[in-house]
Image (tube, rainbow, N blue to C red):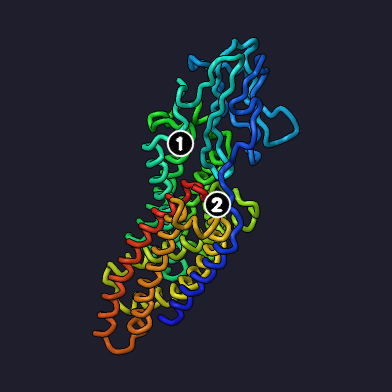
Amino acid sequence: MTRRLFALLALLAACFGVAVLTAAPASAHVELLSSNPADGARLTSAPARVSLTLSENIGIQPNSIKVLDQQGTDVVAGPVFQPGEVAEEVAVGLEPDLPDGSYLVEYAFVSTDSHPVRGTIAFVIGTGPLITSAGAVSASTGTDPVTDALFTTFRWGSFGGVALLGGLVFLLVCRPEGRTDPSARKLTTAGIWVSGVTAVAGFLLQGPYVAGRGAGAIFDPALIEATLRVAYGKLLLLRLAAIVALAVIVRRLLAGDLPDRLRSRYENLGIAAGFIVMLSFSATGHAVADKIMFLSVSADLAHFGAMAVWVGGLIQLAVLLRGRASASEAEPALARFHPIATRSIVIMVVSGAYLGFRLVPSVEALWTSAYGILFVAKLTGFATLLLVANVSRNAVRRGISGRGGTGVVTADLRKLRISVGVEVLIVAVVLALAAALSSMSPTG
């Protein structure tokens, strides 16, 4: 088993090395390609509008462009619109007969992968001095640090909620008798609540996160409306609806008196609702901004789904072992979970290598960018997790099979409890790193 584990780690390292060495430039957030007027332009007369050409089609996002005079007054007239047939071009009209002076254009867009992109350009009408963002009277173009921290924390919680829900697979497939275990049921219920609360929090925080405002603006109606207009907001509402459906489905699945015919139907409904929950993550992450979107989103879905099944099973296994389960009780669950965990790890390795190939722009980025450093830290955490998991697998192989007498089985169960507990702690750290990565640009 140890030999096979190190072979798997070697395969991961080789795949990642080849992927990074041959990687094309990663897809970044939406970028400003050009503007009219251009940044720093000096005009002899007032323009009728300001237009921006972006690197991707993000649709029409209300209030995403402001044009400020030297007093900080917004001189925009009318909503954001698309002035021509180029889908990547957006514009706003300006008030008529603007006086001579310097003007600052502030833009704040939500890219396809749900992250905010902000910036400024400036132009002058007449011969006056050109002001820059440093001299602007308007709000900052950066993300509020408290809002950013809350956004990342709740995203971490959302990953944890999905992992807890993934434990339902362990209960249904590996430990059917655990459906009546209060501790196991509480974990699944906690997964539903954590997933629901973090979905609502993510929806409310998205507006201030994009606008660069503090957490006090979470109930601002204009920001809520802006979130509803973009794909991220719609997908979060879809996730919330799927979580509500899962709450009903899980309650029925964990009932002890459900007929087999209905159980199969509810299992299918649970798979569909779970798929929607996971899709709402993959369709708002870095993968959706990739040029080969279908493959990247599919890899992200596979990676996330395998993580949920494996980590959820580990957490349920920790609960089972914490209760000082006997070998006769633990053996069937462990025997069924072992091949599921192995397949999940293989899927995570293969899909993770592909995502690394698509997202990490170069070898140098691994130590020259914050994204690359966190990516390496996540890989290190995952490799450590596999090494600790090997201890668990050895305990299963040597002890739970029932060989060696009761004393040997008890000793191996004790070792298994410790190693599984350590695995769960490492998982929490890896999920935190994943949450931080999801909030960063691959080129940042």
Q: Residue at x 51, y 38 (%)?
A: 116
**What SS does tag 2 mark?**
helix
Which comes before the other along the chain, label 2 or label 1? 1
The crowd level at tag 2 (other Cα within 10 Å; few <14, some 14-19, many 20+) is many
In which quarter of the view is residue 51 placed? top right
Q: In the picture provided, is 64 more to the left or to the right than 416?
A: right
Q: Is residue 42 visible?
A: yes
In the depicted structure, whether residue 21 falls above or below residue 284? below
- What's under tag 2, amino acid-wise? Ser
In the depicted structure, whether residue 234 falls above or below residue 44? below
Q: Position of residue 326 (x, y in %)?
A: 29, 76
Depth check: give the residue in front, 394 or 384. Answer: 384
Farthest bottom residue?
404
**What SS does tag 1 mark?**
helix
Q: In the picture provided, is 262 more to the left or to the right than 368?
A: right
Q: Residue at x 38, y 41 (%)?
A: 150
Residue named by callout 1: 209
Residue named by callout 2: 282
Q: Position of residue 390 (x, y in %)?
A: 38, 75
Depth check: give the residue in front, 302 or 140. Answer: 140
For the N terminus, the quadrant is bottom left
Q: In the picture provided, is 16 more to the left or to the right than 93?
A: left
Farthest right residue?
85
Q: Position of residue 80 (x, y in %)?
A: 63, 26
Depth check: give the residue in front, 319 or 222. Answer: 222
In the depicted structure, whether residue 54 falls above or below residue 28? above
The span from disc 2 to disc 1 (Cα, nearest Å) is 19 Å
Q: Residue at x 40, y 34 (%)?
A: 144
Q: Residue at x 39, y 33 (%)?
A: 215
- What's under tag 1, amino acid-wise? Tyr
